[in-house]
Image (cartoon, grey):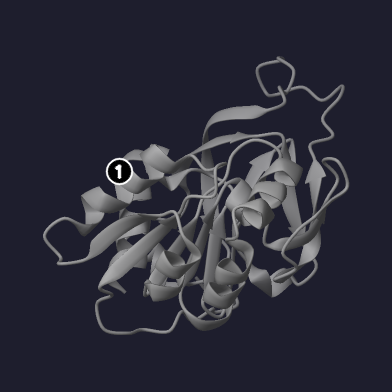
Amino acid sequence: MTGVQTCALPISDMPKTVAVVDYGMGNLRSVSQAVMHVAEGTGVEVVWARTPQEVMDAERVVLPGQGAMRDCMRELHDSGMYDAVMHAAAHKPLMGVCIGEQMLFDVSEEGDAAGLGLLPGKVVRFQLDGQLQEDGSRFKVPQMGWNQVRQTASHPLWAGIPDDSYFYFVHSYFAEPEVAAHTVGQTVYGAPFSCAVARDNIFATQFHPEKSQAVGLRLLENFVKL
């Protein structure tokens, strides 16, 4: 891809442990099973991290999420996981999934919820009233189903994944990064929007890689192995 921003994720030895953060609000089972699948035979242990120490001890961390961002942020604090996740974001590869991506930003329109503030920007709701799709049907919110993702920046986690591959989405809100270079993937649903972001050791997606068949598993494999 010519003329796009390149984002770099630090390359290290194979991690011994990948922690999937269990703070009471994640799509934990499907994410954990997908990460376990791609880690099979590599010697990497995948843990459902139920304590802050398990997150602190892991070499890599996956932050899933589902439901409303306000509820996810409340549970992250109430579970005692907040400080461990912030430490992971500062010191090791961290991957956010769905609401786990939205939580990385400053604030969400959904209940005026404050996020982690790791990436500047806000989370907004689709505004598609009155817009029609090519077949004449109305755009539905939430967006549910498969959509193409254009890779707007090269990144190690895109390795082996063709540009414009289809990934699975279920969401009514999406992130609007303030820094254009933080967007590494874009999707069109009524209008273009950011659906994958990266900065330094952080990578996150609005779509569900664990539900996106081969390309989604490859993305998770890249996170585990690179």
Q: Quadrant of residue 109?
A: top right
Relative side of 53 to 25, left or right: left
Relative height, residue 45 to residue 58 (above, below) = above
Along the viewing direction, whichever of 129 and 38 lies nearer the viewer: 38
Indicate the amino acid at tag 1.
Gln
> Left or right: 128 with respect to 145?
right
Spot occupied by residue 104 in the image (x, y as percentages of width and height): 67, 62
Question: Mark 1, residues whose alpha carbon is within 10 Å: few (<14), some, or many (≥20)?
Answer: few
Q: Nearer the viewer, residue 40 or 46?
A: 46
Report x, y in % for residue 194: 67, 54
- Left or right: residue 104 compared with residue 214: right
Mark 1 falls on what kind of element?
helix
Asked whether residue 162 is in view, the answer is yes
Q: Residue at x 56, y 80 (%)?
A: 200
Q: Is residue 85 above or below residue 36?
A: below
Note whether 72 is above or below 220 in the view shown. Answer: above
Q: Is residue 47 left or right of residue 135?
A: left
Give the quadrant of residue 128. top right
211 is higher (above) or lower (below) than 37: above
The residue lying toward the viewer, choosing from 208 and 107, is 107
What residue is pinned by disc 1?
Answer: 33
Name the residue at 74% across, 35% down. 190
Task: Give the position of the C terminus as an image quadrant.
Answer: bottom left
Q: Nearer the viewer, residue 148 or 69?
A: 69
- Please tell me in which quadrant of the rendered image residue 31 appears: top left
Task: State the residue at coordinates (71%, 45%).
Answer: 69
Tally of numbered discs: 1
**Residue 193 can be seen in this image:** no
Name the spot of residue 86 as percent of width and height, x first. 61, 72
On the image, the x and y values in percent for residue 122 come to 81, 57
